[in-house]
Image (tube, rainbow, N blue to C red):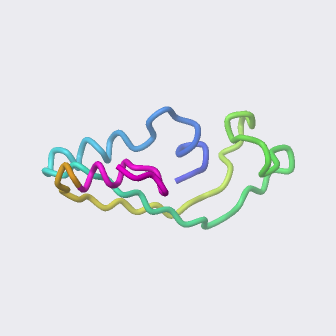
């Protein structure tokens, strides 16, 4: 997937999330690994990809994992690190 596909959309993994729900999952883990960094001199890494019209940005290898978690586990996942609930 390109950086613009991931960062340039409001909800880039909606299709995978819906497929996960159909299969009974309630948590979608998205694992991404940088395969090729940006190569457009007009779009430096310090710029958000949305500001780089016509550039797809970096390329990532993306893998999705579906899980069925208890409500307690989901609350734990939704809790920011260092927060006690």
Q: Is residue 27 above or below residue 18?
A: below
Residue 71 position in % (x across, y down): 19, 49
Which residue sits furthest front?
84
Magenta stretch holds residue 78: yes
Q: Residue at x 71, y 37 (%)?
A: 54
Q: Is residue 61 magenta?
A: no
> Residue visible at 22% across and 48% down?
26
Q: Which residues are magenta?
A: 73-85
Quarter where residue 30 is shown: bottom left
Question: Total number of numbered labels?
Answer: 0
Front-lying residue, 73 or 1: 73
* Percent x, y of residue 8: 58, 37
Left or right: residue 43 compared with residue 55: right
- Residue 73 point in image, percent of width and height: 25, 56
Q: Position of residue 59 (x, y in %)?
A: 61, 58
Task: Name the foreground residue: 36 vs 81.
Answer: 81
Whether residue 74 sits left or right of residue 40 in the image: it is left
Q: Observer-nearest residue: 38 or 31?
A: 31
Q: What residue is shown at x 78% (from left), y 56% (from top)?
A: 39
Q: Quadrant of residue 64?
A: bottom left
Q: Residue at x 49, y 57 (%)?
A: 82
Apparent side of residue 25 relative to residue 74 in the rendered image (left or right): left
């Amino acid at each position: 997937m390109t950086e613009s596909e991931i960062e340039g959309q409001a909800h880039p993994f909606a299709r995978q999330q819906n497929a996960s729900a159909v299969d009974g999952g309630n948590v979608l883990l998205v694992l991404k690994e940088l395969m090729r960094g940006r190569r457009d001199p007009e779009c430096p890494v310090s710029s958000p990809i949305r500001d780089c019209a016509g550039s797809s940005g970096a390329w990532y290898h993306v893998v999705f994992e579906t899980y069925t978690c208890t409500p307690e586990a989901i609350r734990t996942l939704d809790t920011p690190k260092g927060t006690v609930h």
